[in-house]
Each structure stands twice: as C-alpha cells, then as structure tokens.
C-alpha cells in the first residue's frame, strides 16, 4: 500500500568510511512522519554511524539525506532545531544532578532561567525522577538514568527523536516505563527512529523496520512481515506424564513440524510453529487427553531472523565493521 | 501479569503526555548567553567534583612546605628568603597544573557522549569550549589563591603587596588561558581521561622543574642553564616574581603574554576544528 504520508527521513545511498573500514555502505531509508521506525542490527552493523550522519554529528562521504525536509549537510542547523538524540548517542552529564542537567539543556535551548527550572521540574515529575532530582546522575539506577536521558531529549519536544537501544540492560518494569514514554511521544506526533538489537522491542514498538548488516539495509518491512519471512517460531510443550511423550511427539509432528525432544523427559518442542498451527496442535493434545503442565510459543529470535537473512548470527559482529572505531570516531 | 505490569509502570502516562505536549519552542539563545550557560556548568563541576581541584592544589602546597623547610635554608640561606624566592614560582606551578584538567574534562565529555549532546543542539558551535574556559578560570583563581594564602600564612610578605599578588595571579591566569588549549587538543586526540592526565603531567612536570621555579639557574651546568633560561615557565615565573616584588619586569611580562597568545593562536583553531569533526 502506498500512502501519501510525508517522509520524516529520506536517505539515499548514504555512506561513510573510517580509514579502510566501510562502516555504512549505501543505506537507503524512507521513514514516514509520525511513526516509530526500527533499525535492527548487530553491534557494528553501521546503525550508530547511520544515525550520527542523520543527526548531523558527522558528515556522510557518499549519498545524501533529508530530515524533515532539510538536508543534513547544507541545512544542519535547521535539522538540529527539530531533532534530538538519546542514549549512547548523546549522554547527560554524570557529574551534575538530574535537575541541573535539564536546566542546563533548557537554558541552551533558549528558556529563561525561571522557565528552564519550571520545565525541568515538570519533566522530573512526569518521568518519576523528582525524588532523585538533586542527586548526581552517576548515582542513578539504570531505569532512572534512561528516563532522564529521554527527558533531556524532550526539554523542547522534538519533531524527530533518535532513540538508541533505550532498554538495553533494564529490568522489565523499567523497560515497560520506557516503552510507555515512547508510545506517548508518538501519540503526540513525534517521529521516532529506534535502534535496537531486540526483535521483541521492535515488535512492541515499531511500525516499520529496516534490518542493517555490514553497512547495508538487507531487509525492510513490518515486524510481522519480517518474522513471517523467517517463520521459525517454536512451540514448547511440557507434559504432566513423561510416559506419553512419544504419543505427543507424533501428534505435534503432524500438526506443526519437526519435533525436538528436550533433555527434560517431559518436555518437547516443535519447530516452525505460527500462532494458528500452535493453537491447533495444543487443542489436539487436549483432545487426545494428554495433560499439559505448560506450553508456550517462542517468537523467532533476532538470532534466527539474522541467520535467515544474512547467514551469520546476530551476536557475531559483522566482519566489515569495527565497533570500536564506530564509537570512537 | 499484563495487568500488574501496566499498573506498576509508575511514569504516569497522563503526566508524561502533558509534559510532552506543553512545549512551545523558545527563541534560540544568543552566542554569549550560550557560552555563559556552559560557564555555569563549569562552576557546578567545581562544586560537585571538588577532589579535582584538591588534587592540583595539594601537590604545590606540599612542594611549598617541602622545599621551604627542607631545602630552603640550604638553597637561599634562610627559609624566609627562600619563601620569597619560590612562592611566585609555585603560584605558576599550581595554576599551570590546573590547566591539564581542561583537557581531562573535555576528554571525559567526549568519551561519555556529552559532547555529542551539545553538538546536536542548535547553538553557536564554539560556545561549549568558550564556556568551559570560564569555568576553568574560576579553578585557576582558586588554585592560585590557595597557594598565595598558604604562603602568607607561612610568612610570605611580598613588597608589591596585595596589588602585586593580584597582578601576578592575573598574569598567570591569562597565560593559562593560552596553555589550556594545548591540553584541550590532547583531550580531543587521546583515548581516555587517564591518558590525557598522564601525557599532560609528563609534559608539565619536567618543564616546571627545569625552570627557575625552585632554584636560581646560575648554579646550573651550562646547557641546562641555557634551557632553563628559554623555558617559558621560567619567563612566567620571573614575571610573577617581579610583579609580586612590586618592580615589574616588563620584558618578562610581555614575553609571557606573547607566548600565551602564540599558544592560543595555534591550538585554539586546532581545538575547534577537532571538536567539530570528532
């Protein structure tokens, strides 16, 4: 389906080398305004370099990009007025307090001293960091730090936000909080470019996705499309009676696909399950009177998606890119 | 489970929405006010990380005590005569040590990603650098004042009086503005704050000792004396001494200022260029 939504990001043939390393090698992106667009890829795939170019931090050496209608090289200042960065991309100052960080940014964005303070307190309250406002950021918990990062990026609400691995290393509760904030941002009209290594996160948040590997976009689509193209979820079943495992295995093999018998004598899994087939299989087990202790449908992992798309696992760094260099330069 | 996680998400969604939607964009700040905000940030750092300042002021105070009471009598005949000789030089040492921290804090900002945040803002590009200079100058003044106050407590009474001491401090601070850009360049080139600290002190430490800060160079072997005489730190120490004594050595003062201007002329543009491209 083609829509007439204006594009927040249009990049074509974007490229960047560090020394002899081609970190980004001809990336094309078209991100519709008002959506969350995920960029998925392993460390060193070129995600960070791509975003740094789009955010005007480094100039591309090939191709071109327009962000919200402005060229990232010729109209860099206009881009900077409309975008903001979070996470590893742009940090808050650990040697200042949370409130000082927000007041500092408010002042730099043009608020008066009083207005910057009011705005800082409003954000601290909304993001549930008010009680830590006077503490130095280096003493913050991971979740608090991440919320402050995001608050720092919306002192003035940006039209486009680059969000880099917003939930890496967070506990589930903090992760949900961050996701809520991201959804609220989009609901208020901000476009979000989300970089992540987690398929689940992309699945939860993103409307569209690009998978990057070795500096190139290797797949594009909705998270659903992408998983469907891989289609290797697995149905995990645990029986109450280990004695009936062979019977269950026969049934699952017919309903779903190849069955793997787990080391646990009561557990087995069937590879290649989508939600419908899994439901039919589970119903089949119940009909046959085989009692279940537990069952679950595992999503295909990013590893599986990667393996299917690229032929190498996600946690192997892409051979052509050098993570260290990407961050240092 | 979904229900409970949803209710414990304590970032109140309504408040978040309100916070997100209530932001009319203020007009861009002027160049000067952006730089001043960075100056304010520098002051906050002095407040929150006082140990950085302590490090650099304690070492010169230790040297002051050590040299005055251990070697002072042997070098200058009496500890009070030596104090008169060495204190203006230790003022130079104390403040110059502090300049290394300009490079260290710049490198910390760079490695932590704070620089990227500033560079993504629509502000005058040199504002962060000029602003941190402002914060640094407060540090220089504190470091210099500490050593002068300790000296006075030990019996240092310069002939130039209060005015002479202030003039000497002002000259040393101005020189430090020039020198700090050298360390800023190091801060932008090296990999970690520690590497900047090591490289910085490896350069400044021997240069300070191979100057006339501690001893009159006339007793030194010829080649060493020749080096000490042309060492800019000697010139600065001589100028500082003359100002404190109330008999300004105009040549030394002018040469010190010229060296500072020369360092700034080379390293300031280099700093801004590296800052932009890193």
Image (cartoon, coloured by chain):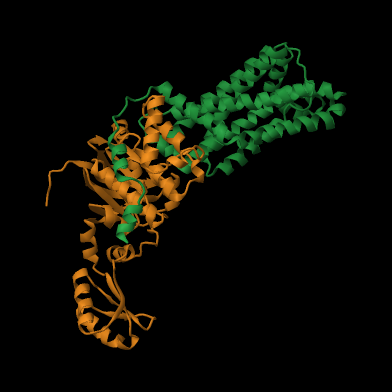
On the picture, is B211 further left or further right than A204? right
Q: Where is residue B83 in the image (x, y as percent from the top left)?
A: 79, 23
- Nearer-the-camera pick, A4 or A132: A132
Is A238 placed above or below B151 here? below
Number of callouts in the render? 0
Specify the quadrant of the image occupied by residue A310: bottom left
Q: Where is residue A228 in the image (x, y as percent from the top left)?
A: 21, 64
Q: Which residue is drawn at 27% across and 53% down?
A: A205
Q: Residue at x 31, y 49 (%)?
A: A180
Is B190 placed above or below B144 here? below
Colour of chain B as rendered: green
Colour of chain A as rendered: orange
Q: Position of residue A187 (x, y in %)?
A: 24, 44
Q: Residue A211, can we see it?
A: no
Q: Where's the N terminus of chain B, which quadrant? A: bottom left
Q: Where is residue A224 in the image (x, y as percent from the top left)?
A: 21, 60
On the picture, is B36 further left or further right than A14? right
Q: Which residue is drawn at 28% across and 72% down?
A: A234
Q: Where's the C terminus of chain B, which quadrant? A: top left
Specify the quadrant of the image occupied by residue A90: top left
On the picture, is A255 further left or further right than B256? left
Q: Residue A154, can we see it?
A: yes
On the picture, is A207 further left or further right than A110? left
């Amino acid at each position: 389906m083609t829509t007439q939504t204006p594009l927040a990001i249009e990049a074509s043939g974007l490229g960047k080398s560090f020394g002899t390393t081609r970190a980004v090698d001809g990336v094309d992106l078209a991100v519709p305004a008002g959506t969350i667009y995920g960029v998925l890829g392993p460390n060193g795939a070129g995600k960070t370099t791509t975003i740094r170019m789009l955010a005007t931090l480094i100039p591309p050496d090939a191709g071109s990009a327009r962000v919200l209608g402005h060229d990232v090289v010729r109209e860099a200042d206009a881009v900077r007025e409309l975008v903001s960065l979070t996470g590893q991309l742009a940090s808050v100052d650990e040697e200042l307090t949370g409130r000082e960080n927000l007041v500092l940014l408010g002042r730099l964005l043009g608020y008066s001293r009083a207005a910057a303070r009011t705005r800082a307190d409003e954000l601290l309250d909304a993001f549930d960091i008010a009680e830590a406002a006077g503490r130095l950021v280096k003493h913050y918990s991971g979740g608090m730090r991440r919320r402050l990062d995001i608050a720092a990026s919306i002192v003035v609400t940006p039209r486009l936000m680059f969000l880099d691995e917003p939930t890496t290393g967070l506990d589930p509760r903090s992760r949900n909080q961050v996701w809520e904030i991201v959804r609220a941002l989009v609901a208020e009209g901000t476009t979000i470019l989300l970089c992540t290594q987690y398929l689940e996160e992309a699945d939860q948040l993103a409307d569209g996705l690009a998978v990057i590997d070795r500096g190139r976009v290797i797949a594009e689509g909705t998270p659903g499309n992408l998983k469907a193209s891989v289609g290797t979820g697995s149905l995990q079943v645990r029986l109450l009676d280990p004695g009936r495992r062979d019977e269950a295995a026969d049934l699952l093999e017919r309903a779903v696909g190849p069955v793997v018998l787990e080391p646990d004598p009561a557990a087995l899994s069937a590879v290649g399950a989508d939600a419908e087939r899994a439901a039919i299989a589970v119903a089949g087990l119940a009909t046959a009177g085989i009692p279940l202790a537990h069952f679950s449908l595992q999503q295909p992992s990013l590893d599986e998606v990667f393996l299917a798309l690229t032929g190498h696992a996600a946690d192997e760094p892409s051979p052509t890119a050098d993570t260290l260099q990407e961050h240092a330069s | 489970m979904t229900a409970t996680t949803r209710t414990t998400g304590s970032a109140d969604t309504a408040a978040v929405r309100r916070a997100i939607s209530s932001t009319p964009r203020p007009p861009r700040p002027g160049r000067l006010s952006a730089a001043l905000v960075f100056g304010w940030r520098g002051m906050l750092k002095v407040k929150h990380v006082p140990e950085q300042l302590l490090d650099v002021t304690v070492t010169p105070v230790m040297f002051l005590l050590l040299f005055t009471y251990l070697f002072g009598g042997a070098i200058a005949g009496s500890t009070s005569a030596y104090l008169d000789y060495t204190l203006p030089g230790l003022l130079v040492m104390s403040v110059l040590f502090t300049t290394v921290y300009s490079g260290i804090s710049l490198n910390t900002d760079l490695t932590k990603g704070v620089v990227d945040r500033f560079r993504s803002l629509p502000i005058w590009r040199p504002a962060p650098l000029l602003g941190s200079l402002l914060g640094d100058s407060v540090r220089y003044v504190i470091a210099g004042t500490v050593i002068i106050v300790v000296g006075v407590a030990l019996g240092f009474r310069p002939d130039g009086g209060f005015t002479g001491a202030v003039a000497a401090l002002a000259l040393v601070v101005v020189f430090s503005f020039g020198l700090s850009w050298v360390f800023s360049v190091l801060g932008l080139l090296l990999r970690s704050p520690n590497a900047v600290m090591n490289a910085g002190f490896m350069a400044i430490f021997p240069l300070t000792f191979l100057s006339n800060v501690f001893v009159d160079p006339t007793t030194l072997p010829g080649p060493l004396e020749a080096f000490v005489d042309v060492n800019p730190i000697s010139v600065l120490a001589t100028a500082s001494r003359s100002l404190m004594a109330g008999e300004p050595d105009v040549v030394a003062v002018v040469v010190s200022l010229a060296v500072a201007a020369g360092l700034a002329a080379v390293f300031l543009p280099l700093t801004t260029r590296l800052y932009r491209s890193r």
